[in-house]
Image (cartoon, rainbow, N blue to C red):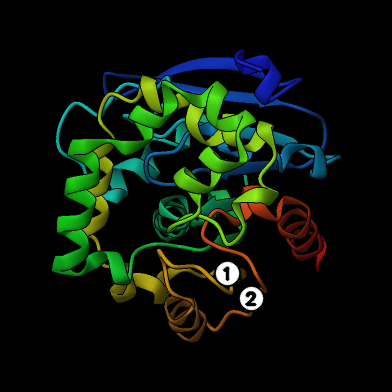
Amino acid sequence: MTEAIDLLPGLEERRYEWRGARLRAFVGGEGPPLLLVHGYGGAAWNFTEMQPHLPGRRLIVPDLPGHGGSAPLPAAASLRGFADALVPLLDGPVDVLGHSLGGVVALRLAERHPELVRRIVVAAAAGISSSTRWAELTITLAGIVQPARIAGRRVERIARSSRLRRLVFGGLEVSNADLLSERAVHGFLRASALHTDALGAGLALAADDPRRDLERVRCPVLLLWGGRDKQVPVEDGFEYARRLRAPIRVIADCGHLLIGERPEVCARAALEFFAAR
């Protein structure tokens, strides 16, 4: 359970460079390409529970700069820089699924490189509530204290203990921590000890308000949201939906980490949307 191959089986680790930063991604599978972009403080392994539900797709799953096995960007970056860092992974148009921070990065990618993005599924996207001053202070504190790094050192115990799962995930992360599998716990916590600059991503997120540029996103978008998301309220999802003129699907009894809490529902909704003409 502790090795990367166990968390994203069948995908090969790939290293590449962008503007002097050495970055990591996992790539594999056959079929139309699908880019999966994780959230703040996460890593590619966050999608370990979704991967089995995405057959027939060539998956491209990066660690964002400063996260997991990816080095930080050489200078303080905006989310545009995080989006641009994904371009070397793409040989042509892709579908994209982005979770939380990854949802905003996906939208920035579509805005800046429309020729590379076919359709986007945005799952519990940050970017609206996170652009407030209070959110900036919270993100900064989390980046300094790094609670996930602390939990990551005890991931084996947390994965096996329902009590510890509820302690770590039961507040702001999921609706029902007892439904998280051991594999999901590893996927969310394993990479936290590797992060080199998650705070940089958090500050870039807090400084970014994507609403002013959403009209530049021309590709079709679907929004997925947990009905009990305590980190990014569903009201943010409705505002995204209105500004993007996009449909939103609210998943009942589900929190912020919907890609691990209800992976089969997220994957099914995404594949149906990507298959639409």
Q: Residue furthest front?
A: 163
The residue wearing badge 1 is 225
Number of the label disc, if any, that sits on residue 233: none
Number of the label disc, if any, that sits on residue 250: 2
Q: Residue furthest right?
A: 56
Report x, y in % for residue 167. Answer: 46, 46
Alpha carbon distance from label 2 to label 1: 5 Å
Q: Are marks 2 and 1 in contact (CB under 8 Å)?
A: yes
Decide if residue 64 is on the left or right side of residue 121.
left
Amino acid type, label 2: Val
Report x, y in % for residue 6. Answer: 70, 18
Can residue 262 be seen here? The reply is: yes
Residue at left 64%, top 29%?
160
Decide if residue 194 is on the left or right side of residue 252.
left
Q: What is the quadrant of the C terminus in the image?
A: bottom right
Within 10 angstroms of label 2, few (less than 14), some, or many (20 or more) residues? some
The local secondary structure at tag 1 comes to: strand
Within 10 angstroms of label 1, few (less than 14), some, or many (20 or more) residues? many
Does residue 257 sit above or below 219 in this rendering? above
Residue at left 29%, top 42%?
81
Report x, y in % for residue 184. Answer: 64, 37
Amino acid type, label 1: Trp
Report x, y in % for residue 188. Answer: 52, 36
Can residue 61 be seen here? The reply is: no
Decide if residue 173 is on the left or right side of residue 162.
left
Does residue 204 sit above or below 121 in this rendering? above
The local secondary structure at tag 2 comes to: strand
Residue at left 39%, top 73%?
214
Q: Nearer the viewer, residue 27 or 125?
A: 125
